[in-house]
């Protein structure tokens, strides 16, 4: 009978495999944390997009509908301070 020598794995090889396993585990944890952060950011941006789309839809309705004159008059009154000829505007200062 011929005995075959079993190849033994050396200490250096075991240390290299252990180091690689630790590196791979740390990399996977880091990637998972990045994925979670990106998912939260995506959710936040999607909510912001939904809000902006709602505002956009409201503005589209305001300027394209039958009440375009009403919208323009409201903007002129609120933002620019315009009034109709002969109109008197009263400002309630008691609530300030």
Image (cartoon, grey):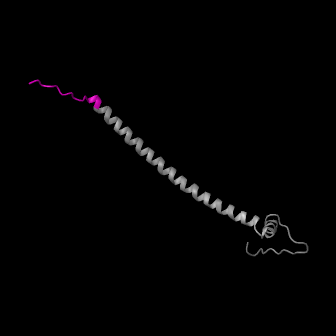
Q: Residue at x 16, y 25 (%)?
A: 5
Position in image of residue 55 (x %, y %): 67, 62
In this rendering, would 88 be left or right of 66? right
Q: Closest to the observer: 60 or 23?
A: 60
Side of 16 where 91 appears, left or right: right
Q: Position of residue 32 (x, y in %)?
A: 44, 47
Q: What residue is drawn where x is 79% and y is 64%?
A: 79
Quadrant that contains the N terminus: top left
Name above or below for residue 23 compared with residue 11.
below
Q: Position of residue 23 (x, y in %)?
A: 38, 38
Residue ranking furthest to the right: 86
- Residue 91 lies in what quarter of the image? bottom right
Q: Quadrant of the image for the C terminus?
A: bottom right
Instruction: Give the image location of residue 6, x and y in percent.
Output: 18, 28
Near-viewer residue (49 or 10):
49
Q: Nearer the viewer, residue 79 or 70?
A: 70
Looking at the picture, does residue 49 appear above or below residue 91? above
Q: Residue at x 68, y 63 (%)?
A: 57
Predominant SS of the magenta segment = loop
Most foreground residue, 95 or 66: 66
Does residue 4 appear left or right of residue 25 in this picture?
left
- The residue drawn where x is 47% and y is 51% is 36
Picture quadrant where residue 64 is located: bottom right
Residue interval drawn in magenta: 1-13
Q: Is residue 7 above or below residue 93?
A: above
Q: How many marks?
A: 0
Residue 27: quarter of image: top left
Asked if the stretch drawn in magenta spans residue 51, the answer is: no
Residue lying furthest top: 2
């Amino acid at each position: 009978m011929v005995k075959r020598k079993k190849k033994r794995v050396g200490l250096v090889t075991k240390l290299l495999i252990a180091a690689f396993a630790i590196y791979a585990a740390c990399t996977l944890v880091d990637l998972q944390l990045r994925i979670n952060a990106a998912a939260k950011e995506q959710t936040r941006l999607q909510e912001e997009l939904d809000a902006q789309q709602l505002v956009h839809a409201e503005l589209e309705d305001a300027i394209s509908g039958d009440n375009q004159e009403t919208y323009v008059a409201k903007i002129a009154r609120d933002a620019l301070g315009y009034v109709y000829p002969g109109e008197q505007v009263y400002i309630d200062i008691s609530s300030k």
